[in-house]
Amino acid sequence: MNQLTRITVGSSFLLMLAVFYYFDTGGWIIPALTAVFVHELGHLAALIAADCPITRLDATWAGLSLTYESGRITPVCEAAAVAAGPIANLAAAGLLAATRYNKWAWTNLLLGCFNLLPVREMDGGRLLGIISQSLMSRRAAGAVCAAVDHTVICMLLTGSIFYITGENRGSTIPYIAAWLFFCRFIEKISKPRYNK
């Protein structure tokens, strides 16, 4: 039985929307919000199909996230639920491109691909964790995930340096690297420094 017991919309989410709206001169906010909605609907549909209890929906500066009882779902169903968000975006991108809604197609394509990055904050990182834990010990899986995570972050930072020093100014790589860096920074400063 699926029972969503708590929905929170943080002030940081509203601030992020306001900043995005202020700097959005190209009319990207509605396609971007629609892509986020499609993404979360993909996760939601897969979790409902797996009969996994969904307990929370949180809207923060990092976007939307669903919390569910992962102990009550098989690893295969959990991997399918995690992959369902990016798959929904990629399917929507294909449909929208076929109907020539290019801006809407691009936002879905970018969000789907962005979420498939194998770093811990993204669906790709969660997928890597689920798959690696089913193939090896938890400790080895953690080491593999950490190595892949660090490698991808280094590649994004290197790409950002080439972007800043080069002539191509149309890349999204620096924005992705900055967002992931900011996620790590917030996570680090929000952890308690000692146990009482």
Image (cartoon, rainbow, N blue to C red):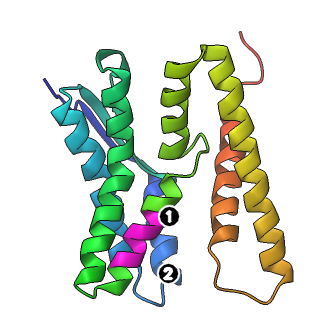
Helix, strand or loop: magenta stretch:
helix
134 and 32: which is toward the camera: 134
Expressed as whole percent of the image width and height from the top left, the position of residue 11 reads: 45, 53
On screen, 130 above or below 80?
above
Q: What residue did someone put label 1 on?
A: 16
128 and 65: which is toward the camera: 128
Label 2–label 1 contact, CB within 8 A: no
At label 1, the amino acid type is Met
Which mark, by number, is residue 69? none
Expressed as whole percent of the image width and height from the top left, the position of residue 167 reads: 79, 90
On screen, 49 above or below 11?
above
Expressed as whole percent of the image width and height from the top left, the position of residue 112 reads: 43, 60
Residues shaded magenta: 105-111
Judge left or right: residue 164 versus residue 100: right
Q: Earlier in the sequence, mark 2 or mark 1?
A: 1
For the point 59% across and 45% down, which residue is it? 118
Which residue sits furthest right? 165
The 10 Å Cα crowd at callout 1, few under 14, some 14 to 19, many 20 or more, is: some
Q: CA distance from mark 2 to mark 1?
A: 10 Å
The image quarter containing residue 7 is top left
Expressed as whole percent of the image width and height from the top left, the position of residue 23 reads: 53, 82
Which residue sits furthest top? 196
On screen, 21 above or below 62?
below
48 and 22: which is toward the camera: 48
What secondary structure is found at the residue carrying circle 2? Answer: helix
In the rendered image, is residue 2 in sight? yes
At label 2, the amino acid type is Tyr
What secondary structure is found at the residue carrying circle 1? Answer: helix
In the rendered image, is residue 37 in sight? no
Q: What residue did someone put label 2 on?
A: 22
Q: Quadrant of the C terminus?
A: top right
